[in-house]
Image (tube, helix red, strand yellow):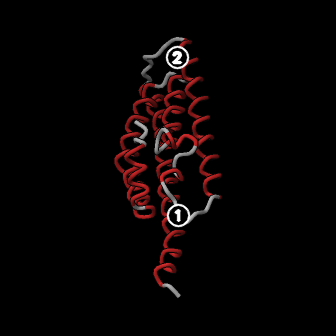
């Protein structure tokens, strides 16, 4: 029995599990940003984006952010069913992943900014910017390291071709 193949098979589920834990922590930080934004807004009540136009823009952002998240998740689900030992860059270039490496984070950011506009919450927008930075420099960086470990040069080629979400 080839021990390298056995080790590779055992590591793949472990790496996939680590990615899912990392993503759940990242999404929890986005949720925390919403909660903090609303709480800060209740305490410090700063309303600088008055007007119905901002509410409509907020609704549009929520719609598009949610659509991007759905598109990313359904693409991931479909791609997870395609198992291949000989993956090349085309494996990654499906759905929104052709345009950004982190479409779910992009969709969450757009949707939460929309929520902040809809409820006229200055602090929701501030907290989502802070969350974006935390996500970019901690969670996405770590996710890229894990994917590089899992897919090697194929992921590095994909990373050169498709940029981060912002």
Instruction: Name the foreground residue: 113 vs 158.
Output: 158
Up the image or down, 52 lies above or below 29; here it is above
| Lateral position of residue 59 relative to residue 121, left or right | right
For label 2, the SS is helix
User: Mark 1 vs mark 2: which is more N-terminal?
Assistant: 2
Residue 119 rendering spot, x and y as whole percentages: 54, 24
Which mark is drawn over residue 17?
none
Q: Nearer the viewer, residue 81 or 37?
A: 81
Question: Residue under circle 1?
Answer: 86
Q: Quadrant of residue 84?
A: bottom right
Write down the residue under mark 2.
54
| Secondary structure under the numbered disc 1 in the rendered image | loop
Q: Is residue 151 above or below residue 164?
A: below
User: If the image is split into quadrants, where does the C terminus sit?
Assistant: top left
The residue drawn where x is 51% and y is 33% is 112
Vertical placement of residue 119 versus 159, above or below: above
**Label 2 packing within 10 angstroms: few (<14), some (14-19), many (20+):** some
Which sits in the foreground, 17 or 154? 154
Q: Position of residue 104 (x, y in %)?
A: 53, 43
User: Is the Cβ of the residue at disc 1 closer than 8 Å to that at disc 2?
Assistant: no
Give the distance between the C-alpha atoms of the residues marked 1 and 2, in whole angstroms. Answer: 48 Å
């Amino acid at each position: 029995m080839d021990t390298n193949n056995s080790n590779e098979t055992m590591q793949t589920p472990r790496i996939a599990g680590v990615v899912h834990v990392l993503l759940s922590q990242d999404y929890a930080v986005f949720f925390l940003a919403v909660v903090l934004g609303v709480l800060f807004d209740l305490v410090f009540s700063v309303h600088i984006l008055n007007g119905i136009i901002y509410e409509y823009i907020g609704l549009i952002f929520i719609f598009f952010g949610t659509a991007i998240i759905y598109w990313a998740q359904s693409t991931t689900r479909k791609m997870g069913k395609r198992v291949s030992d000989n993956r090349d860059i085309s494996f990654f270039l499906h759905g929104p992943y052709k345009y950004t490496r982190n479409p779910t984070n992009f969709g969450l950011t757009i949707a939460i900014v929309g929520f902040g506009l809809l409820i006229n919450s200055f602090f929701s927008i501030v907290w989502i910017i802070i969350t974006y930075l935390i996500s970019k420099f901690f969670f996405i960086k770590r996710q890229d390291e894990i994917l590089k470990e899992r897919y090697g040069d194929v992921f590095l080629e994909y990373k050169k071709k498709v940029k981060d979400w912002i």
